[in-house]
Amino acid sequence: GAVVSQHPSRVICKSGTSVKIECRSLDFQATTMFWYRQFPKKSLMLMATSNEGSKATYEQGVEKDKFLINHASLTLSTLTVTSAHPEDSSFYICSAQKGGSGSSYNEQFFGPGTRLTVL
Amino acid sequence: ILNVEQSPQSLHVQEGDSTNFTCSFPSSNFYALHWYRWETAKSPKALFVMTLNGDEKKKGRISATLNTKEGYSYLYIKGSQPEDSATYLCAYTTGGGNKLTFGTGTQLKVEL
């Protein structure tokens, strides 16, 4: 159990367009989902924490108007990169946390990630 | 230590060799230390979650230890196999929070 999918796995877009990435918990309900970004040879950096039915909490330095997060259900969170530019090219990965007593030491279950390339 | 540091950055070993990696983290306000195994094009998978100083966890040929007072954890792989090739990530959380702070990982390649 505890499978998280992410779609698409890879996307190439033109500068100025918006890109939506989906993160789904397939076999559990996730009250909290997280979005990370990874630059080459760097660690996974938390961008925002998303709670179902409420606004996301963004980490310092992350533009909320640039990276729109929606967590409309207990199994789906989306990250939309608006007006993407080449500097937004990166690897984006989500994780999900089981709700209530299902979470052990705040364990997170990860998706496989999305490679975004903005031309 | 202000951030999570992992060493070595990469490692090449021969099949059958035993190996170990280090994860250093801030020892103040510690809550839990997580080890993940991340194969290329797949999702990071949790190996261990450790919370208590002196904790030791084992899963098959892989084991981990934790020292919360000095802020480090070791991951050991006994008798490495090619299928152990992956990036091993550690992350810690502080008390009262659920945010993971990651290291950059140790990339292991096991050769025949």
Image (cartoon, coloured by chain):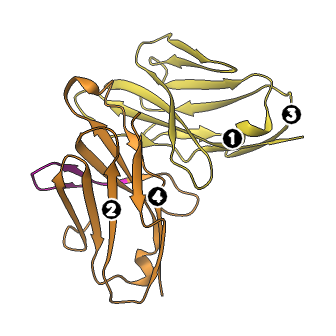
Can residue A60 be seen by looking at this rendering?
Answer: no
Name the residue beneath numbered marker 1: B8
Q: Which residues are magenta?
A: A46-59
Circles 3 and 4 on the same subunit: no
Name the residue beneath numbered marker 3: B15
Name the residue beneath numbered marker 2: A22
Q: Given this view, does label 1 or label 4 mark the residue nearer the observer? A: 4
Circles 4 and 2 on the same subunit: yes
Circles 3 and 1 on the same subunit: yes
Quarter of the image for residue A66 reads bottom left
Name the residue beneath numbered marker 4: A113
Chain B colour is yellow
- First in sequence: mark 4 vs mark 2: 2
Image coordinates of residue B97 in percent, x first then y, are 25, 34
Q: Rounded to the nearest whole Å, what is the CA distance between mark 3 and mark 1?
A: 18 Å
Q: Is residue A58 left or right of residue A43?
A: left
Give SS at disc 4.
Answer: loop
Mark 4, chain letter?
Answer: A
Q: Rounded to the nearest whole Å, what is the CA distance between mark 3 and mark 4?
A: 29 Å
Towards the viewer: A64 or A76:
A76
Towards the viewer: A7 or B71:
A7
- First in sequence: mark 3 vs mark 1: 1
Are the residues flagged by discs 2 and 1 in contact, CB closer than 8 Å?
no
Q: Residue at x 50, y 51 (%)?
A: A43
Give SS at disc 3.
Answer: loop
Q: Residue at x 62, y 31 (%)?
A: B22
